[in-house]
Image (cartoon, rainbow, N blue to C red):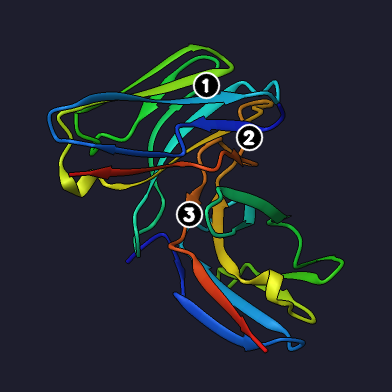
């Protein structure tokens, strides 16, 4: 397995469910990202985990909760979502060198539908 | 306005050249990137250019940077149906969090 792998590819959930998205990178990178992609909107950064810090977009609702147990794995825990949370959720990784690492490698995404 | 702006759609005929344009606002941007997203897939880094360059060529791809006007373009020569995708411009200030545009949907028709 190479690159960045996301599971599941598709997820349908009700507003009262709890689910988790999983991401795994096999590139030896030291930073991982969650992005939300909605139609006709800019790509929205949700969370970043790097070697030394976690960065979060303050506009992301608390019903989204990230977890990064090690440099290869990233989770996004979902609970009591709203229909407007339906989107493609993309995971990415990059290699930071001297604090710079904007060449991102993306997974194929999880297409989430909230009913 | 948004930090990175692109037109939403571009339609070209197969074999023609495609030019996708992007403007950005951060004059301290160090790197400018082009990503490609095919249907059902994530974004893939196509090419990038340092801010001290004004042109970079890679096979059918030519990136032009006008730093004074904060304008970036991607030219695809001899556009093929396989080039149909969404193309994202992104700018980086030398950290690890790039800023993306909304993406330009390139439609290639016979």
Name the residue: 77% across, 71% down: B62
Provide residue B7's location: percent of width, then percent of height.
Answer: 46, 76
Extreme residue toward the right, this view = B59
Whether labels 3 and 1 belong to a single chain: the reply is no
Query: Which residue was labeled with disc 2?
Result: A101
Image vertical order of residue B32 relative to residue B60, above or below: above
Whether residue B30 is visible to the viewer of this picture, yes or no, is: no
| Quadrant showing the C terminus of chain B | bottom right
* Side of B78 relative to A20 (left or right): right
Chain containing mark 2: A
Residue B18 in which image quadrant = bottom right
The secondary structure type at the circle numbered 2 is loop
**Cα separation between marks 2 and 1:** 10 Å
Q: Residue at x 43, y 62 (%)?
A: B102
Q: CA distance from mark 3 to mark 1?
A: 19 Å
**Percent position of residue A47, x then y:** 39, 30
Image quadrant assignment for residue A24: top right
Residue nearer the viewer, B79 or A95: B79
Residue A101 horizontal/vertical position (percent): 63, 34
Mark 1 = which residue?
A50
In this rendered view, identify the residue nearer to me: A14 or B71.
Answer: A14
Q: Name the chain letter of the residue that bears numbered label 3.
A: B
Q: Is residue B88 above or below residue B80?
A: above
Circles 2 and 1: CB distance less than 8 Å? no
**Which badge, 2 or 1, is on the more N-terminal residue?**
1
Locate the N terminus of chain B by quadrant. bottom left
Tell me which residue sits at (64%, 50%) in the image. Answer: B44
Q: Is residue B87 visible?
A: yes
The residue indicated by pointer 3 is B100
Badge 3 marks a residue whose secondary structure is strand
């Amino acid at each position: 397995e190479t690159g960045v792998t996301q599971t599941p590819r598709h997820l349908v959930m009700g507003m009262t469910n709890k689910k988790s998205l999983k991401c795994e990178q096999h590139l030896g990178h030291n930073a991982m990202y969650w992005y939300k992609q909605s139609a006709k909107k800019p790509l929205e950064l949700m969370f970043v985990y790097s070697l030394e810090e976690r960065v979060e977009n303050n506009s992301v609702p608390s019903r989204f909760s990230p977890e990064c147990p090690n440099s290869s794995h990233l989770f996004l825990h979902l609970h009591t979502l709203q229909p407007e949370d339906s989107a493609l959720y993309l995971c990415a990784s990059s290699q930071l060198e001297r604090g710079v690492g904007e060449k991102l490698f993306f997974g194929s995404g999880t297409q989430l539908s909230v009913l | 306005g948004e930090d990175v702006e692109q037109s939403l759609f571009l339609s070209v005929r197969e074999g023609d050249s495609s030019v996708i344009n992007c403007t950005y606002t951060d004059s301290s941007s160090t790197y400018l990137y082009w990503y490609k997203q095919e249907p059902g897939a994530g974004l893939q880094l196509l090419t990038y250019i340092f801010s001290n360059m004004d042109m970079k060529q890679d096979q059918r791809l030519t990136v032009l940077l006008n730093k004074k006007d904060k304008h970036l373009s991607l030219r695809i020569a001899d556009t093929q149906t396989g080039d149909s995708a969404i193309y994202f411009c992104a700018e980086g200030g030398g950290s690890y969090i790039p800023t993306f545009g909304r993406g330009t949907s390139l439609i290639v028709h016979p």
